Amino acid sequence: MATKKRFPTDQIEEPVLDMSSLIDVSFLLLIYFLVTSTLEPRESDLSMEMPTDGGKASSIQIDPLKIRLTAAGQITIADQVMTDDAQMEAELDRYKQLTDATDKQPLVIVASDDDAKQQRFVDLMNALARVGITTITLSGFEKGK
């Protein structure tokens, strides 16, 4: 006769590891390290000026060019009397090239006598336009100086 066990034995289950808590901890660690780490900046993000072969000419100051128109129609550029329109245009072109080379905008100050002929003033403005100077300041028109 078979003997019956009085107390039934529990069946032993395979051990199970709950992975959900481990995944949560690993994501928290990943987020912590991403937030606290410092990323190296790219070279393009650095405010660095690379040298050029042209050099930096912007530190040179160019004075405004002073032009005077007298009642007799005589034009004086930087205290030098212009004998003809070709010389005047050459002097204006030289000033324009100087300002272009230094990356500055040319500035011309024109002082005219009240008795000066209008056509001579228009000739001066046309010469300025031909060489490409567009920034012109008209100082007060002076009588007899």
Image (spheres, rainbow, N blue to C red):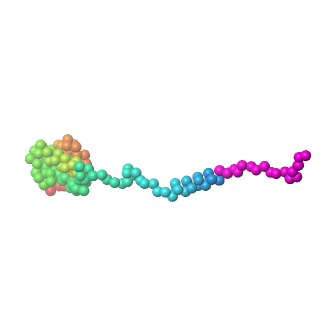
Q: Residue at x 41, y 53 (%)?
A: 41
Please identify the residue farthest to the bottom as the structure is shown.
36
From the viewer's perspective, is 61 left or right of 25?
Answer: left
From the viewer's perspective, is 128 left or right of 27?
Answer: left
Task: Look at the image and say whether residue 19 sits in the magenta stretch.
Answer: yes
Q: Quadrant of residue 120?
A: top left
Task: Look at the image and say whether residue 11 sits in the magenta stretch.
Answer: yes
Q: Nearer the viewer, residue 50 or 1?
A: 1
Q: Which residues are magenta?
A: 1-20
Q: Residue at x 15, y 44 (%)?
A: 89
From the viewer's perspective, is 16 left or right of 142?
Answer: right
Q: Quadrant of the C terminus?
A: bottom left
Q: Nearer the viewer, residue 125 or 60?
A: 60
Q: Main secondary structure of the magenta part?
A: loop
Spot occupied by residue 81 in the image (x, y as percentages of width and height): 10, 51
Spot occupied by residue 18 in the image (x, y as percentages of width and height): 67, 51
* One can see residue 122 in this view: no
Spot occupied by residue 107 in the image (x, y as percentages of width and height): 23, 51
From the viewer's perspective, is 43 left or right of 119?
Answer: right
Spot occupied by residue 42 in the image (x, y as percentages of width and height): 40, 51
Q: Residue at x 74, y 49 (%)?
A: 13
Q: Residue at x 37, y 51 (%)?
A: 43
